[in-house]
């Protein structure tokens, strides 16, 4: 059996293992190790295994992942973002579907203090869904907008997916963050547009607010936003002014979240313990999967699978937009069965050489891939954000109703992806402006 046949056989086995519900990290690492063992022998396989693990764990940029996660969990458990949601509710309640729009804006705000789509959906779900259901919003709209809005959490920085993409492709994380800002804001605006159109067409989806809001209430609500605004100012002000790097921003943000929670008098032992435990578990799972993906990259390189695929696609003269359409199809299919981190790290070893050969911006590719992966978070049958919202609302709303509520948002997501492909400047303008 030739090296190339061993490589393709390994890829096939890894996919079959994942489809059989074997943990992604186990599937990637075991197939890669056995493949390298067959190609180079036992001594080389163990040497590569130890080298890959050490090189990955020793990567300084990755220290930002647990720090940003800790910042997000502290904000979540200490309730630092409740004031932001309340302010949005007061100011936006007069719009059609005002609370649903508030949820989208609140999710965009919460995204600035967490890199997790799931955390964003869970936080907004606990705050907004009960209030919308109480006021008579249809369950489909109330839960669907939260599940969709949660995807903004992985686009607007800090984003764990963008950090992993940057480490894997050696692309500056700070520039990826800037690209994510454009895509995240475009997504939020598109969701708001969908909500307004839907409520205009069917006013029964969201009853209008009967209680007038006074100027004093608006001023009081704005005062409650100081914890989130202070964190945003510290992290992003320092990051984009050059005071500290994207890696250092994680540590600064984590430390600042403790200080702000203490100032807000919501920091206690329970908040600290729950945040540390969840950060540790989430970080460990991310790192294990990523180590498996790095081993797969080495295996595909040694077997020349990556080179053959790259040469084949380049031979067809694929333009960046054609490759982007291919990536859209690929990641939408993977989104049906895999969660985002696993899907990205499973495919990057294969598509990375092809992206390099197309000579398009890795910032554009990175943000586009993350957007596509997040669309998978609301597509059945996996749709992780849907099940997160379901766990929050309990038996008040069925899973079928939540899936029924996300279809309009999924349709506008395809429009957003089309705009990102047709007009790459929507993603790259800000990185080019600030990074130049």
Image (tube, helix red, strand yellow):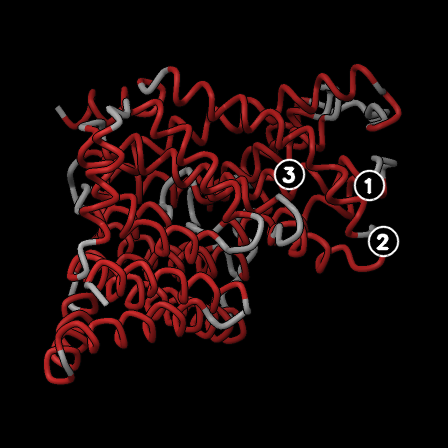
Q: Alpha-carbon distance for marks 2 and 1?
A: 8 Å
Q: Secondary structure at mark 1?
A: helix
Marks 3 & 1, CB-CB < 8 Å contact: no
Task: Please tell me which residue lies in front, 21 or 408.
Answer: 21
The vertical placement of 132 against 115, above or below, is above
Rate crowding at label 3 as few (under 14), some (14 to 19) or many (20 or more) other CA atoms within 10 Å. many
Marks 3 & 2, CB-CB < 8 Å contact: no
Task: Please tell me which residue lies in front, 174 or 329.
Answer: 329
Which residue matches tag 1? 139
Marks 2 & 1, CB-CB < 8 Å contact: yes
x and y, in percent, of residue 374 in the image: 50, 43
The vertical placement of 321 against 241, above or below, is above
Q: Which mark is residue 86?
A: 3
Nearer-N-terminus badge (3/2): 3
Describe residue 47's horizontal placement relative to residue 151 as left or right. left
Describe residue 272's horizontal placement relative to residue 247 as left or right. right
Q: Residue at x 24, y 62 (%)?
A: 294
Q: Residue at x 34, y 22 (%)?
A: 321
Q: Alpha-carbon distance for marks 3 and 2?
A: 23 Å
Q: Is residue 52 visible?
A: yes
Q: Work out which quarter of the rendered image holds the C terminus and state it.
A: top left
Task: Please tell me which residue lies in front, 129 or 93.
Answer: 129
Q: Which mark is residue 244?
A: none
Which residue matches tag 2? 396
Q: Residue at x 71, y 60 (%)?
A: 391
The vertical placement of 49 against 316, above or below, is below
x and y, in percent, of residue 266 in the image: 53, 61
x and y, in percent, of residue 427 in the image: 33, 25
Nearer-N-terminus badge (2/1): 1
């Amino acid at each position: 059996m030739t090296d190339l046949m061993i490589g393709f056989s390994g890829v096939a086995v890894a996919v079959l293992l994942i489809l059989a519900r074997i943990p992604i990290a186990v599937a990637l690492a075991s197939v890669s190790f056995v493949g390298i063992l067959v190609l180079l022998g036992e001594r080389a396989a163990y040497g590569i295994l130890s080298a890959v693990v050490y090189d990955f764990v020793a990567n300084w940029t990755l220290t930002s992942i647990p720090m940003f996660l800790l910042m997000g969990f502290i904000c979540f458990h200490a309730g630092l973002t409740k004031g932001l949601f309340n302010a949005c509710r007061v100011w936006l309640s007069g719009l059609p579907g005002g609370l649903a729009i508030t949820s989208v804006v609140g999710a965009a705000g919460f995204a600035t203090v967490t890199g997790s789509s799931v955390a964003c959906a869970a936080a907004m779900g606990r705050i907004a869904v009960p209030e919308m259901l109480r006021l008579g919003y249809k369950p489909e709209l109330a839960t669907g907008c939260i599940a969709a809005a949660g995807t903004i959490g992985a686009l607007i920085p800090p984003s764990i997916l963008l950090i992993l993409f940057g480490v894997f492709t050696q692309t500056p994380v700070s520039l990826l963050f800037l690209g994510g800002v454009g895509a995240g804001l475009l997504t939020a605006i598109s969701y708001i547009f969908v909500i307004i159109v839907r409520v205009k067409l069917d006013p029964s989806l969201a009853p209008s607010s009967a209680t007038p809001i006074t100027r004093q209430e608006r001023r009081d609500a704005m005062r409650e936003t100081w914890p989130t605004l202070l964190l945003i100012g510290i992290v992003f002000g320092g990051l984009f002014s050059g005071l500290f790097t994207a890696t250092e921003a994680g540590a600064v943000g984590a430390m600042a979240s403790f200080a702000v929670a203490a100032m807000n008098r919501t920091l206690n032992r329970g908040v600290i313990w729950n945040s540390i435990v969840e950060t540790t578990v989430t970080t460990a799972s991310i790192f294990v999967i990523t180590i498996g993906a790095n081993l797969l990259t080495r295996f595909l390189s040694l077997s020349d699978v990556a080179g053959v695929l790259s040469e084949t696609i380049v031979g067809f003269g694929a333009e960046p937009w054609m490759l982007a359409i291919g990536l859209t199809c690929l990641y939408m299919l993977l989104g049906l069965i895999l969660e985002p981190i696993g899907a990205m790290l499973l495919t990057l070893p294969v598509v990375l050489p092809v992206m390099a050969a197309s000579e398009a911006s890795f910032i554009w590719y990175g943000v586009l891939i993350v957007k596509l992966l997040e669309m998978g978070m609301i597509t059945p049958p996996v749709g992780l954000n849907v099940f997160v919202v379901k766990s929050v609302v309990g038996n008040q709303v069925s899973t079928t109703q939540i899936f029924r509520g996300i279809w309009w948002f999924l349709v506008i997501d395809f429009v957003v992806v089309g705009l990102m492909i047709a007009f790459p400047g929507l993603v790259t303008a800000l990185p080019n402006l600030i990074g130049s």
